[in-house]
Amino acid sequence: MLKHWTLVTLTLAVFAARGDANSGSCGRQKPNFIFIMTDDQDSHLNSLDYQLVVQKQFIQMGTSFKKHFCTVALCCPSRVSLLTGRAAHNTNVTDVNPVSGYTKFIAEGLNDNYLPVWLQAAGYNTYYAGKLMNGQTPATYNNPFAAGWTRSDFLLDPNTYIFNNATMVLDNGSVETHTGKYSTDLIANRSVEFLGDAINSKKPFFLGITPIAPHSETLLTPSGPIFKAPVPADRHKDLFPDAKVPRTPNFNPDVPGSVNYFATLPRLTDDQVQYNDDYYRRRLQSLQAVDDLVSAVISKLESHPEVLANTYLFYTSDNGYHIGQHRLPPGKSCNTEEDINIPFIVRGPGIAAGKVATFPTSHTDIVPTLFELAGIPLHENFDGQPIPLTKKSQKSNKQKQEHVNVEFWGEGIMEGTLYSHLADQVSKNTYKTLRVVAENYDFSYTVWCTNEHELYDMKTDPYQMKNLYGSKAATSSFNIPDLTERLDSLLLTLKSCKGKSCRQPWETLFPSGEVQNLQHAMKKKYDSFFKSQERVSFSACLKGYITSAEGSLHSEPYAGKLADGEFEARWEDWV
């Protein structure tokens, strides 16, 4: 009998060891992940409406997270934050230039501490096709190689954004320039190949697919980048001849904005509006090859139903985009909703089809989400937290976060060939932005490096046309001066947060746990506490995260006590 039980114990131990690599926390096969990320795709200019395959395979088959934000409206720092689960002020990768791109990623020690490395340690095969980040060049891609990839085919600068002359490096081998071949199609073909390898390996896998569309065709020259309209595949170049930039209330408005360069931008001329419409059509046309890519990947998965049934598929962009809103030329890097609120759609096991979620999420939440799905313990220094993707997780998550911290350092990016005269005008583009989104309120609050402020009630003013900062009125049932003090203190808590203080900033302000959201914080008993806080401010407009120019870096915690009987009332609010 003893020998029998010993044999059973050893057998269970073997299965447990196998389960470390191949099973989730409940003994199920670990799920697979396919992550498709476009470059500069908007959520507010209706680009998804022109992608019939994405509509069918993602929007109809999955859940759209309508309040998903990038935390930096610029590709390289946004991608690094996504891949690490950490805010840009913690990665210190804050720009796209060579000094702040791949070489900065390496210098900060992140090549050993990001998603593919962690997934491989958990038993995953990892694959990647497309743009990883700016600054990967023939001179830097192997110094050292990007770690953690089972197979890869990376786009390399300076040809990353040349649609028909891409330079790529397959499996850390020799550099090859694909003259005359369309970049998105190259990535589609490689993705299907990698997917076949992943399926045949019989191991759980992550496949990252990152085409450059609808990014501008960008020439990276010694004197600076030259931004031209995207180049569609030849088969798509005549589509949508009547498409125009949506004429929303904030499109080329009669009245300029209220702060910084928004207050001085001239109205777009008729020629510029026509140029922007053509630029917009080229973006839509370039996304059709992305639709073809999605179709090819889904078709490959559908030929292996058992794999598809255990695979989560994500569709998103690294940041958003504007064309003509607030008189802006084509570009990104602003704090406007067009630039920071981006597509994010997920389908897979347990995820509702054709549904919309409206609670806020961000790119720093994606790695924690993958960890939770894969049964990997979360890192304490993650600034994000798992997104409740399924109905079950959404019901059990009573305390969904309501805040997103957005940050930017450096100059604004104006694209297109008609706007070089505005380059100096947008040089002071460093800012801190806070988005607070709940069922009954929705606010955007910004402090610029010029120490100008913006406050918008997104419920009543979704196009950000009326700056409420300094008003004595009320909005969403909140007194604006009191509201501003709360938002500023929350932003102060988030501007240099790390780990838990990023995930639970109200608990940092109120260690007792008596305040869990903005609604709680608006109680009059806290007025003097919020008035006593330092304010978010800058002493200079710099091009990087240099704390000496960023004023006070931390808020002070509340030292008061709950009144008799208030604990019970507050507990009822929470549950």
Image: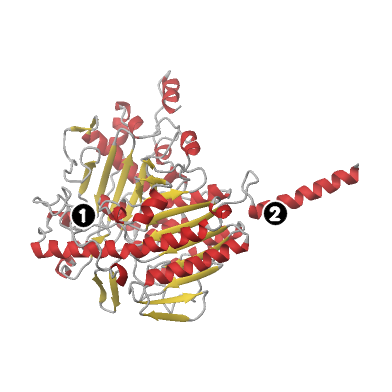
User: Left of 318 or right of it: where is 271?
Assistant: left
**What residue lies at 51% left-to-right and 58% top-to-bottom?**
301
Label 2 SS: helix
Residue 507 appears in the picture as rendered? yes
Q: Assess disc 1: are there few (<14), some (14-19) or many (≥20) residues with their C-alpha within 10 Å of its C-alpha.
A: some
Does the rendering let one see residue 80? no
Q: Residues within 10 Å of mark 2 (few under 14, many from 20)?
A: few
* Percent position of residue 340, x then y: 31, 52
Residue at 36 percent across and 51 percent down: it is: 55
- Identity of the amino acid at label 2? Arg
Residue shown at 46% from the left, 42% from the top = 388
Answer above or below: position of 287 versus 254: below
- Which residue has dot 1 on it? 450
Q: Is residue 341 left or right of residue 113?
A: left
Based on the displayed image, in which of its 4 quarters is residue 423 positioned? bottom left
Color style of the picture: secondary structure
N-terminal label among 2 and 1:
2
Q: Is residue 98 above or below residue 4?
A: below
What x and y, as percent, mark residue 257? 14, 51
Front one among 296 and 453: 296
Classify residue 516 as left or right of residue 249: right
Q: In what element is the residue under mark 1? A: loop
Question: From mark 2 to mark 1, how far is it between C-alphas?
Answer: 57 Å
Q: In screen coordinates, is 542 left or right of 88?
A: left
Give how far across and how far down residue 307 sits, in percent: 56, 55
Q: Residue at x 11, y 60 (%)?
A: 268
Query: Quick check: marks 2 and 1 in contact, CB under 8 Å?
Result: no
Of badges 2 and 1, the one in the foreground is 2
Q: Quadrant of residue 161?
A: bottom left
Q: Amino acid at mark 1?
A: Thr
Identify the disc placed on residue 18.
Answer: 2
